[in-house]
Amino acid sequence: MVNNFEQLKKRILELKREKNAVILAHYYTTPDVQAVADFLGDSLALSIKAQSVEADTLLFAGVHFMAETAKVLCPRKHVLIPCLEAGCSLADSCKAADLAALKKQYPDHLVVSYVNTTVEVKALTDICCTSSNALKVIESIPKEQPVIFAPDRNLGGYIKRLTGRDNMILWDGACHVHEDFSLDKLRAMKAKHPDAKVVAHPECKRELVEEADYVGATSGILKFCGTDPCKEFLVVTESGIISEMTRLYPDKRFIPALPHNSNCCCNECNYMKMITLENICACLEKGEPEVEIDEDIRHKAERSILNMIAIK
Ligand code: 13P
Ligand code: SF4
């Protein structure tokens, strides 16, 4: 049983070669996990990358809906997820049966769903989106076409404000991590760091987003922090992204924004942190858990994801 970081890392590298496997990781995973990844990205970049990976096995170091998306796009590959419990509160907030009922109520509406959804929800969706392309996806739809936007009410509300569209029905879902940032604490941090710029993910509540100098997906936030001359940033998204920020821009300072709970020094996604070097190693050794999807559902979900990728 290998148990320290260097040994685990070495074993994972051997297993990747042995099994012809590639590891895709999201920015919200721990720095240790990010260190063994072949590709690191946000949810859009990872979906696109999954399509072009040549390896037989794809291990997804991220949450379940991300691995499912990769399986939808690469049905012939073995798509592994090291921990089946690594879910997502946002995906949980939208059940396929409830979305089907809403669609029945509004049959003339087009359904746009965030990728943070189950494959069954994607199968009921016309076009998927991620936080990095949601605006483009909505702008690609004629203004007079009504839309159901699921499941994130904060991202949906943000896009609604940007586009001025009032024919968008917003699903009442949210991410427990992004909803929990404290406005009072952010304001106090701004007072303490008057030269810092605020960067925020659009899954945050409106009042937090309105404090931000830049609002965008994780990849957009990373890019902004690199191109903006400012040296200090208050980061209003999951704190896992800070390791990549520090790696890319070592001369800049990144301060995580705080959740309401006063005991925490940052805001972490408990699901993303379920992915560890130990379970990655075990998953590669055993070749399981593997993501399996019913072919009919996969086929329907693929259409909505490909519609998204075509828009980018
Ligand atoms: P990104 O689309 O920015 O990768 O976000 C994914 C996510 O889970 C946000 O909470
Ligand atoms: Fe889901 Fe929120 Fe975690 Fe992202 S941060 S995976 S939206 S629970």
Image (tube, rainbow, N blue to C red):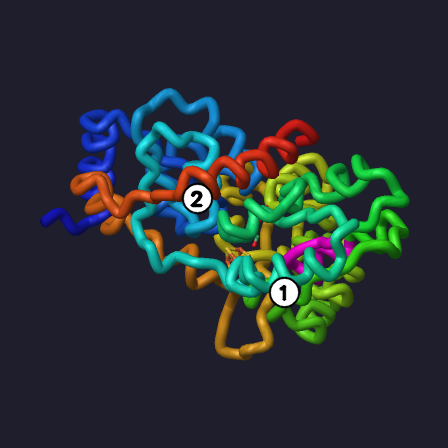
Helix, strand or loop at disc 2? helix
Residue found farthest to the bottom = 262
Q: Kindly check if marks 2 and 1 are in contact, taking CB atoms under 8 A apart as contact.
A: no
Quarter of the rendering containing residue 14: top left
Helix, strand or loop at disc 1? loop
Circle 2 residue = 68
Residue at 76 percent of width and 57 percent of height:
106
Identify which amino acid the numbered label 2 is placed on: Glu
| Mark 1: C-beta under 8 Å from nearest atom of ligand 2 | no
Q: Is residue 197 above or below residue 105?
A: above
- The stretch in magenta equals 148-158
Residue at 17 percent of width and 40 percent of height:
285
The answer to if 66 sits in the magenta stretch is no
Q: Quadrant of the C terminus?
A: top right
Circle 1 residue = 173
Q: Nearer the viewer, residue 27 or 111?
A: 111
Q: Nearer the viewer, residue 248 or 169?
A: 169
Q: Which mark is residue 131?
A: none
Quarter of the rendering containing residue 262: bottom right
